[in-house]
Amino acid sequence: MESKKKRIFSGIQPSGELTLGSYMGAIKNWVALQDEYECVYCIVDMHAITVRQVPADLRRRALGQLAQYVACGLDPEKSILFIQSHVPQHAELSWVLSCCTQFGELSRMTQFKQKSQQHADNITAGLFTYPVLMAADILLYQTDLVPVGEDQRQHVELCRDIAQRFNGVYSDTFTLPEPFIQRVDQGARIMSLGNPMNKMSKSDPDGCVNLMDPPEVIQRKFKRAVTDSETAVRYDKESKPGVSNLLTIYCAAAGKTLEEAEAEFQGQGYGVFKPAVGDAVIELFRPIREEAQRLMADKAYLEGLYRQGAERASRIAGRTLAKVYKKVGFLPR
Ligand code: TRP
């Protein structure tokens, strides 16, 4: 019997290392959703090549990301964990959906506008049609909810529009997904350590802390974190963005409330505060890093995992794609 749980789909690109931001903003929440929902979590390597990648690095990071997913607590028994390029239906559905998507809709995507400025020498068709591939990811699994950050909301909404249009033209085929934006609670939005006005991003190596960074590297990054010219450890997002971000990180890592943290560092300067935040993150990541390293040493196990994940994913994706091919009028094989 098919389970009646609602289905969740999400993914992260292996375009860089997983960061403190990806952990607190996404993976930690994904772990918590596993019992209540039927979860499908993807490593979206096909999305990563919308900008240029070094092939060997991409391969290494995709495998590393799988090990880190598992080490963070994503359970391959409960959830489907797989690599996007292993399930051919993503590319196949993407083509059909691209024929149901307007050029104008894609032109309005703010992430495309940003990324095409950042990569002005390499604005590919793939960068432009990326939201269509993302729609295929989501719709193949008849997804109900898509946990993403605010920056991906527009893409999920486009996905919904495409699904609605397809259903209208060809009859009901796709579940209409909804963005599932994480509660803006402690740790949901981690900012760059170097520039606390920007979100922590893997493309900003100085401002980000990676899940796999060794303790001394984590500590060095926190000691260098930008603060302000005062001395008080106090939460004030407007006038003290750096300190506020560090407090958010500290609370999430150490499991404390803002009041507790402010009281703890009352009368102490940043020279005490910053290393304490570093230590909290080091302790949070230590077991994850050790487990991921252990898994990385067992390549056969990881290969077995991703093969099994792709098989399970492909079974669901294949059902959806077969319906789609029939509805649009492709002759059966
Ligand atoms: N575009 C997302 C990002 O860059 C990653 C992604 C690809 C995704 N496909 C997805 C997220 C499907 C949720 C659902 O963050």
Image (cartoon, helix red, strand yellow):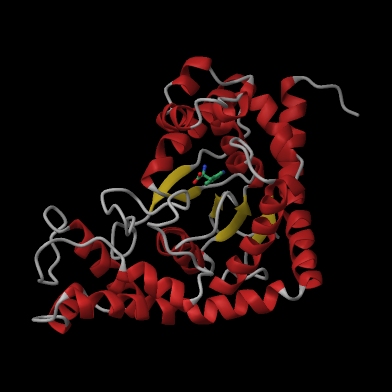
- Looking at this view, is 128 or 8 the one in front? 128
Residue 84: horizontal and vertical position, in percent? Answer: 68, 47
Residue 136, quarter of picture: top right
Identity of the residue drawn at 64% across and 39% down: 49
Q: Is residue 204 above or below residue 101?
A: below
Residues 164 and 58: in front is 58
State left or right for residue 279 relative to residue 72.
left
Q: Residue at x 61, y 23 (%)?
A: 125
Q: Quadrant of residue 108?
A: top left
Report if residue 2 is visible in the image.
Answer: no
Left of 234 or right of it: where is 329?
A: right
Q: Is residue 62 above or below residue 168?
A: below
Q: Is residue 120 above or below residue 178?
A: above
Q: Specify whether residue 186 is in view.
A: yes
Going 54% across and 27% down the picture, which residue do you hit? Answer: 162
| Whole-percent x, y for residue 239 in the image | 11, 55
- The percent coordinates of residue 144 (x first, y second) are 51, 47
Q: In this picture, is 132 found above or below 147?
A: above
- Horizontal and vertical percent position of residue 269: 14, 77
Query: What count of labels does the image hold?
Result: 0
Q: Nearer the viewer, residue 141 or 195?
A: 195
Q: Is residue 275 left or right of residue 127?
A: left
Quarter containing the N terminus: bottom right
Task: Look at the image and tell me in which quarter the C terminus lies.
Answer: top right
Residue with the most extreme right position: 333
Residue at horizontal 74 percent and vertical 39 percent from the top:
89
Q: Quadrant of residue 133?
A: top right
Residue closest to the eye, 269 or 299: 269
